Image (cartoon, rainbow, N blue to C red):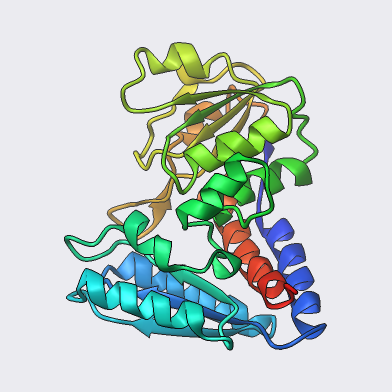
Amino acid sequence: MKTLNGRELAAAIRAQAGAEAAAGPQPRLAVVVATADEASLWYVRSIAKAAAGVGIACDVVDLGPDASPDQIGETLSRLSADPNVHGLMLQTPLPAGASAQELAIAIDPRKDVDGANPLSLGRLAAGLPAFAPATAAAVLALLDHYEVELRGRRAVVVGRSTVVGKPLAHLLLDRHATVTVAHSRTRDLASVTVTADVLVAAVGRAGLIGADHVAPGAVVIDVGTNPTDDGGLTGDVDFEAVSHVAGALTPVPGGVGPVTTALLLRHTARAANLP
């Protein structure tokens, strides 16, 4: 079995983002945060650190876990209108009563580097230029990096979120894959996933995908990042069991995650250079 590590690809994308950042005005990314969730805050810190490494300014706007939806929306609108901000994203989770999908409408699509605004998702579905959600784009980037053929292949995406599942299905369709989207209401999940040449798990349920879910030789992409009791991360795929069946498999951590962060930076650099 081949391990599809994302760190080498992430380094190449970061280098590209740095070169694009140096070619024009310094890109500035603003990340709006309204949570005390430590895993989320750790992720935001990792974005800021990676941005600094490639010459991209990163402003973390921490509104606190008690921020109201109106306060969050007003902040997003203000930053969207700020000509010195080129990329803008809203970090989740959000306080009770705040809807990420509703609030994302306030993000200017030209600055929507994580593809959260419904307008960005609509353009993506229509095949028009838009920033795709970085995690969905990272899956495709990994498949391309390892030269996984998609044309005419069966792809099954487990998960239907607007962050990964739905946009990824469109990206795979654009590459001429035959796509099935499975989810929590899918009956006999294994009978669906075992048909996949390319299987993507993006549910957020540790160990959901076992050996019986995977066809021999299939390429398996694990998007899950589930915290473990010892402070680590584990994916949606039972790595040990599936490694004996799959032809290729991403690790968690070290697979999709690093590529996602790198793509956020590249999207920001490109947003700064939009005419």
Q: Position of residue 193 (x, y in %)?
A: 50, 19
Q: Position of residue 110 (x, y in %)?
A: 60, 67
Picture residue at 62% right of the left edge, 40% below the top: 126
Task: Report whether 121 appears left or right of 144.
Answer: left
Q: Quadrant of the C terminus?
A: bottom right
Camera sees residue 1 = no
Task: Report whether 226 appears left or right of 261.
Answer: left
Asked if residue 273 is positioned above or below residue 57 in the image, the reply reads above
Q: Quadrant of residue 224?
A: top left
Asked if residue 107 is positioned above or below residue 119 in the image, the reply reads below
Foreground residue, 46 or 127?
127
Task: Report whether 68 appears left or right of 28.
Answer: left
Q: Quadrant of the N terminus?
A: top right
Camera sees residue 231 = yes
Picture residue at 23% right of the left edge, 69% below the top: 69
Q: Position of residue 196 (x, y in %)?
A: 59, 19
Q: Position of residue 26 (x, y in %)?
A: 69, 88
